Image: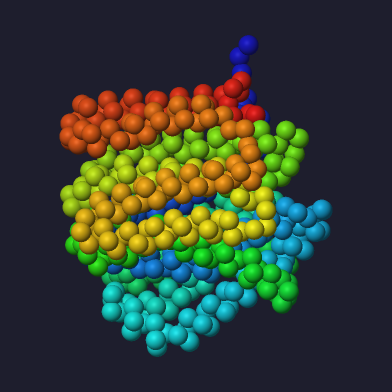
Amino acid sequence: MRYSRNELLSVSIRTPSLLFSRLSSAVKQQLCYAVGIIGMKLIGFMLLPWITTVLGVTEYARLESLMALINGAIVITGFGLVNNLYRLTGQANDSKGEQAKAADVFGSAIFITLFTVVLLIALMPVLLPWLNQFWAISSTEYSLIVVLISAESTLAVPLAWLRIKEQAGQFLVITLGRTLLYAMLTISFLQLDMGLTGLLLASVIAVSYQIVHLFWLQFRDTGFNIRYPAIKQQIRYGLPFIISGLAMYATQGLDIILLSQYIPAVELAAYALAIKFFLIAALLSQPFQLWWYSRRIPILNSENGTQKAADGAVAGAILAAALGLIVAVTAPVLTLMLFASEFAISLQYLPWLIIAGILKQWGALLNLGCFTTERSEIQMGIELATGTLCLIAFPLVIPEYGVQGALYCLTVSQLLRFIAYYLISQKMTALPYRHTSLLLPSMICIMLILLPIIFPTLYYNTYLLVLYISISTAIAAGIIWKYILNNAQGLLQKI
């Protein structure tokens, strides 16, 4: 039987949509999250070689120092809002109850945003001179930083609400829209020789678009209520998360702040680039985690919930290890091809950062027992202990050992954090984890990640590097298929 050209064209157009329609809801959601988040970071990463060239190593190192400061302040303005939203909506009996709880949390977020702006602007005469003792910050840059810090509260809640309501399509549109706007503005402002101020201004404009779009969606779905009882409840619930968040910041952020005072700008810039690849490894796991975190408590409370919750956590942990391996073997090629030779030293830092990132994700996935109670002090205690370890160790080892000292501290702290979360969570709510399924593939991935540390010349022998990349990528893909996606045995199919 012969088909006309129009019939063949019609079939070719319909085929992708038919394939997409046959995917499960969970896979569709994760696919949208993947495109949105990975697309957002990929565009930013593609700009990075050009940005480092235009800014220069010294100014790029200053940019990373300021971003570390911003991320530390965002921990406070985040105020545990997302966790509270998940908890309150998960306890609601119907959709109206969900909407009412979401309106309260969103109202609290708006209040926190406005309060933060007023407070930071009022303290500018005190904070700006103090900050300038360590980093050069203009008054314009300070004002732009205030906006970026304050925006986090208003952004976090609507984005979490989209995940709760499975509106991954909206999530995709908003995240990519912000990223494309930022990319266009960054190119324009740097061409106008606006430097670091131009980068911050591009971020503020892009964030403002995202706030307006998300505010409109949230107001349409739930409205918002700025009520004293809700704000009081949010403060009481959120304070432990702020403390634990700051403790987490001590394990990821404080290192750059301290290193900026002790090592040359070239080393700091190289370390910051290694962190970018480390974040990409974590980013690749986020589509699964964004989908999983908003569902794991309802799944735990469902029929056969303990086994399903355990399988979901193990699936995420295996995925983190496999994707970490893929990043670890591809990052050297991208670094040597796209960046100046000064950044090659980052390859020495990357394996340890990747392993620390895997351990961090394990702690976040195998900790469900800690979230089955309203006592957020448990998480606070673990994060506080981990952060205190880094807070004590970083000032001791960084002046003496520089980046290597920071890497060892990070890896040990994340290992101890994971062990603490696992043991305490199991004590509170014992889950039947499939330990063999987790440990066997993960150990293979970790050994391959560490291989360049044992054989440092691996990165500079083209034949061995290609062989290493090929074998490692094939193993990572096989692990993801066998343990997660396989229709017959994959953990994702068991949830």
Quadrant where the N terminus lies?
top right
Seen as rendered, the residue at the extreme top is 1
Q: Is residue 16 left or right of residue 131?
A: right
**Image location (x, y in percent) of residue 222:** 74, 63
- In the image, is residue 316 above or below residue 391? above
Observer-nearest residue: 315 or 417? 417
User: At x 48% / y 74%, what residue is drawn?
Assistant: 147
User: At x 37% / y 62%, what residue is drawn?
Assistant: 391
Residue 426 in view here: yes
- The quarter of the picture where residue 22 lies is top right
Observer-nearest residue: 183 or 221? 221
Residue 107 in view here: no
- The quarter of the picture where residue 8 lies is top right
Observer-nearest residue: 14 or 34? 34
- In the image, is residue 429 above or below residue 122? above
User: At x 48% / y 60%, what residue is drawn?
Assistant: 384
Quadrant where the C terminus lies?
top right
User: At x 71% / y 62%, what residue is drawn?
Assistant: 102
**Image location (x, y in percent) of residue 387:** 43, 59
**Image location (x, y in percent) of residue 365:** 54, 44
Q: Is residue 135 left or right of residue 116?
A: left
Seen as rendered, the residue at the extreme front is 427
